Each structure stands twice: as structure tokens, then as C-alpha cells.
Image (cartoon, helix red, strand yellow):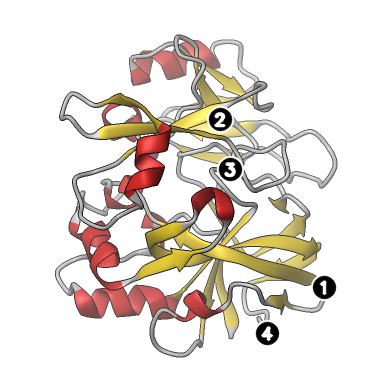
Amino acid sequence: MTIAAIYRYPVKSMQGEALSRATLDERGVVGDRAYALLDVQTGIVASAKVPKRWDQLLRFSAAFAGEPVAGEPAPPVVITFPDGSTRRSDDPDVNQALSSVLGRDVSLITTPPDGAGFEELWPEIDDLAPQHIIDATIARQEDTGEAISRFDVAAFAPPGRFYDLAALHVITHSTLARLGELAPDSRFDPRRYRPNVVLDDTEPGFVENDWVGREMSFGDDVRVSYTFQTMRCVMTTLAQEDLPEDRDTLRTVAKHNRVDIEKKEVAGRWACAGVYADVTAGGELAVGDAHS
């Protein structure tokens, strides 16, 4: 297996950066999800997992002004707005500019507040998630009647970055190709799934399902321990760049790849594509490196 692509997302839920090489530490790709927007009114970390409120975030993109260094504060980011204009994260009017476009009072932050959480909408798609998880976490309802849950930021990752659950997310071309075979009218582009690493030259099918509990290497230095499969959400269905909105992308996962996850806090049967990992040994990795 080889690394086909590496991605870093400097601002949570915005478009990120495709990299030829990256440094990993115990918190994942250095600089990944280093920034996020805080909804000033609610104290919730903004996430496109609640599309009615935040899907516009996917129309923004962010790139670091300088390369981030492990163990040091994140450098400023340059944010490209939907109209093509740019602001730096250290511009004095950046929060005002972001709030104006998003229609809500937001603040760009680099440190998750104590007890920070994000929200996630459960679309009306059968077999997406265990009902007991939805029932236990529901915070409110969308005006469509769809449930919205609240979760802690970085529940299973080292603190300090704005992950949903884990430090590293890996997906294979095999999984994306299999989904494309099952639903040929939909586009299963890696951008929908926001992975850190995309792997090529794997066996056919949903190969990541079998990696949980295994420790594997990237290149010469990096080692990861695969922890649990990646549960998929409404964000994978949203329009972004040249990809249309398409809930069939998520319905296909829910119909054809439901996986029993044994991790206590999220135990149950979920619609999955890809796999999460902890970084057990950091270092550099590059496109073309072997994964074994």
C-alpha cells in the first residue's frame, strides 16, 4: 500500500490543504484542525455537521501562512472567502468579516474552551447510527424535525485541537471505489470524507474494516494504531467546490457498510467508511511512502 494523498485542515469545517509531505506528532498531522470558529451566542464550536447553520463553512478555504512546527503555537492562516477575498487570522477585522458572511457572531479561536462541544444533525437516513446514541446525546431539533446531538470536541484524541473524535483519519481508494460501484450515479470523492491520509494499492472492498487493533507504519518513521472505524455523517453529503449535495452518498454507506464498533462510549452498529488511528510514533510522511 502507498500514500496517495495527504490533507490538513487548518480551520475546522473549511476546505484545507493538499500536501506532498507532512509531519505527525501524537496529536496527528501538525496543524490539523488548529483553528475553529466559536459561535459566540451558544458557545458551540462551529461544524458543518449542522448544515442549515454552518454549511457555508465549506465555501471557505484556509492555508497556513507559514509551516506549523510541532510543539509551537500554530502560525497564522490565510482564509479565502467565498467571494475570493482573503483575510489573515491575525487581521483585526477577521471575526467581523467572518460573522458578516456567516450571519452569526463568531470568533476564530485556537484553544478549545473548557467543555467545548460541537453539534451534529442526524439526517433521515435508515441505519445510520445506533438509536441509543442519538437518544442519549440529543440537544435540540432542526425545524425539519431531525435530531441534533451535542458531543465533546476531540473525545478520543489528545486535547488541544478541534477534532471530532480522533487524531488521524485514513481512507482507501478501495473503499471509495467500492461505494462508487454500489451507487454509480454518485461521486465518492475523498473531499467528502475529509481524511488526513488516502491510501492506494489496497485490496478491493472496505479493507479498513479489518485494521482495527493493528499497528502499522507510514514510511520509515511514523507508526499508527488503528482504533475504530470512521462513522459517517451528513457532512459527507454536502455541496462543496464542484461536488453537488447528494444524500445518496450517505445512504449507500448506511446500506452496505454498517459495522459493529466495540468502543464503549460509542458501542453499536454504525454506517462507516474509513478508519481512525492514534499516532504511536511521530515523524515525517510523504505521498508515495509505503504503508505496511
**Pointer 1 or 4: first along the chain:** 1
Residue 163 is labelled as: 3
Give yes or no for contact between labels 2 and 1 (Cβ–Cβ under 8 Å). no
Left or right for 274, reference 49: right
Label 3 vs 2, first from the N-terminus:
2
Crowd band around label 3 with a 10 angstrom C-alpha radius: few (<14), some (14–19), many (20+): many
Q: What SS does tag 2 mark?
A: strand
Q: CA distance from mark 3 to mark 1?
A: 23 Å
Mark 2 closeness class: few <14, some 14–19, many ≥20 residues within 10 Å: many
* Three-letter code, disc 4: Ser
- In the picture, the disc for residue 292 is 4
Report the residue at 36% width, 41% height from top.
134
Mark 3–mark 1 contact, CB under 8 Å?
no
- In the picture, measured across the screen, residue 70 lies left or right of residue 180, that is right
Q: Residue at x 61, y 17 (%)?
A: 91
Is residue 35 shown above or below 6?
Answer: above
Residue 161 locus on image (x, y percent): 66, 38
The amino acid type found where label 1 is placed reads Asp
Q: Which residue is label 2 attached to?
A: 36
Q: CA distance from mark 3 to mark 4?
A: 25 Å
**Percent of width and height locating residue 54:** 35, 29
* Foreground disc of the pair 3, 2: 3
For residue 80, side relative to residue 23 (left or right): left
Query: Image point 75% across, 44% down: which residue?
Result: 68
